[in-house]
């Protein structure tokens, strides 16, 4: 692969997997709401929108780390070798945070 193509490859990889991130977080959020929510008001809708925006910004940190490694460290860290590990562990972590966040929000004295 040409060195000029590496940043494009990084962006293509992370953006092509963003749907997994959003779908999984949405499903775990909906599951949590179905199981634990006894009310749903405008504050929750605003909270969900803010959570989704912040979560997607944090998802982009994987892409950002790889690009920083490429440009500033000349790929000495070799973060691209751990791309799938970062993706899978990040997805699982975000799914857990989403589900547990719903539980904490709706169960008093949790």
Image (cartoon, grey):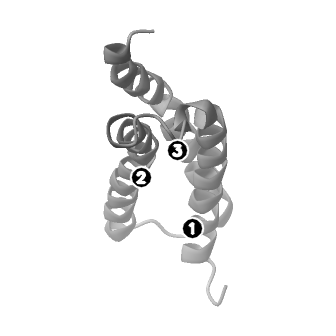
> Along the polypeptide, which appears first: circle 3 or circle 2?
3
Spot occupied by residue 89 in the image (x, y as percentages of width and height): 66, 46
Please give the name of the residue rendered at 55% of the width and 36% of the height, measured from the top-left corner: 78
Spot occupied by residue 9 in the image (x, y as percentages of width and height): 41, 19
Q: Quadrant of residue 48?
A: bottom left
- Quick one: label 2, few (<14), some, or many (20+) residues within 10 Å? some
| Front position in the image: 49 or 15 | 15
Above or below: residue 23 compared with residue 50: above
Relative placement, left or right, of 79 versus 2 is: right
Q: Residues under labels 3 and 2: Cα distance? A: 16 Å
Q: Are marks 2 and 1 in contact (CB under 8 Å)?
A: no
Spot occupied by residue 31 in the image (x, y as percentages of width and height): 64, 51
Q: Quadrant of the N terminus?
A: top left
Secondary structure at badge 3 equals helix
Please give the name of the residue rendered at 68% of the width and 60% of the height, measured from the top-left corner: 35
Q: Which residue is mark 1?
A: 101
Q: Which residue is mark 2?
A: 58
Which numbered disc covers residue 6?
none
Residue 33 visible in image: no
Q: Quadrant of the C terminus?
A: bottom right
Spot occupied by residue 85 in the image (x, y as percentages of width and height): 66, 39
Please give the name of the residue rendered at 32% of the width and 66% of the height, measured from the top-left corner: 42
Q: Quadrant of residue 8?
A: top left
Q: Which residue is mark 3?
A: 26
> Along the polypeptide, which appears first: circle 3 or circle 1?
3
Secondary structure at badge 1 equals helix
Above or below: residue 82 compared with residue 12: below
């Amino acid at each position: 692969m040409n060195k000029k193509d590496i940043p494009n490859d990084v962006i293509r990889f992370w953006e092509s997997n963003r749907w997994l991130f959003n779908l999984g977080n949405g499903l775990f959020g909906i599951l949590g709401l179905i199981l634990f929510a006894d009310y749903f008001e405008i504050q929750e809708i605003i909270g969900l929108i803010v959570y989704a925006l912040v979560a997607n910004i944090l998802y982009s940190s994987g892409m950002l780390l790889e690009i920083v490694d490429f440009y500033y460290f000349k790929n000495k860290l070799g973060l691209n070798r751990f791309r799938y590990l970062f993706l899978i562990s990040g997805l699982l972590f975000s799914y857990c945070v989403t589900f547990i966040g719903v539980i904490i929000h709706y169960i008093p004295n949790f």
